[in-house]
Image: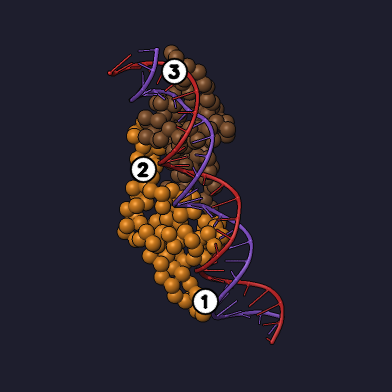
Chain colours: A brown, B orange, C red, D purple
Amino acid sequence: MFPKLDPLLHSELRLAVMSVLAGVESADFTFLKAQTGATAGNLSVQIDKLATAGYIAVEKGYKGKMPCTTCRITPAGVEAFDTYVAALKEYLSGGQA
Amino acid sequence: MFPKLDPLLHSELRLAVMSVLAGVESADFTFLKAQTGATAGNLSVQIDKLATAGYIAVEKGYKGKMPCTTCRITPAGVEAFDTYVAALKEYLSGGQA
DNA sequence: TAAACCAGTTTATGTTATAAACCAAATTTA
DNA sequence: TAAATTTGGTTTATAACATAAACTGGTTTA
């Protein structure tokens, strides 16, 4: 049987965000926007959801005088991502896991 | 940059259906329902979408006196599935493809 | 015949993803 | 300095989507 896919991660943009954050120590809003190609509005919403779920930590500060939102993946986020990847592989392998 | 994920395949149930069909010559409605654990209603809708997209071929016949809907993946479906899998791997690898 | 069941479709509903519109502060230009 | 532009986002409105509940048409069983 196919495992349930974490709906929070089974979203193109949120998955992209997690994918980026999985590979770096931290990333600010602008960087994530550039990497994912998302609109700011969409990114803002999806970051919120990931933060609410505890998958990422969001820190609001300033870089110089400009506001700067920094995100980093949490241990819970790493685990959720890993679990999602493992689950997804069951689907991709054509069902013969 | 992250590739766009085919929205038709980026759906838990449709992906499961395609995953099953990728591994067999053909499968009827009941079998797909059992394999995916989906409700009949949901499965019916999603099969329709995959058929409309040309990813699967649907044949309506009878098994004895009972109606029987048989599905099989099309060449276009195989290609779309492969493309989706390749695209998804970019996400799963943490962005460093 | 009536009740239960099978295979599947239609329809209604709540959720979601997404972009458009907006806002405040900082910077640049004239 | 004042106006215009840019930066870094947030809020809000909308359209698409997944899903289950209700339904249909027919069959088997009692």
For the residues carrying marks 3 and 1, which lies nearer the camera in this image?
3
Depth check: C7 or A53 in front?
A: A53
Depth check: A73 or C25 in front?
A: C25
Q: Which amino acid type corresponds to the residue marked 2 in the rendered image?
A: Lys
Q: Which residue sits at x=37%, y=30%?
A: A35
Q: Position of residue A46 (x, y in %)?
A: 49, 36
Q: Secondary structure at mark 2?
A: loop
Which residue in the structure is indicated by mark 1? B66
* Residue B73 seen in this snapshot: no
Give yes or no for contact between labels 2 and 3 (Cβ–Cβ under 8 Å).
Answer: no
Q: Residues within 10 Å of mark 1 (few under 14, many from 20)?
A: few
* Cα–Cα gap, marks 3 and 1: 68 Å
Q: Which mark is residue A66?
A: 3
Q: Which amino acid type corresponds to the residue marked 1 in the rendered image?
A: Met
Q: Which residue sits at x=41%, y=49%?
A: B7
- Residues at discs 3 and 1 both on one chain: no
- Residues at discs 2 and 1 both on one chain: yes
Q: Secondary structure at mark 1?
A: strand
* Residue B45 seen in this snapshot: yes
Which residue in the structure is indicated by mark 2? B4
* Cα–Cα gap, marks 2 and 1: 41 Å
Left or right: B5, with C15 as reference point:
left
Q: Chain of mark 3?
A: A
Q: Chain of mark 1?
A: B
Q: Secondary structure at mark 3?
A: strand
Q: Position of residue B45 (x, y in %)?
A: 48, 61
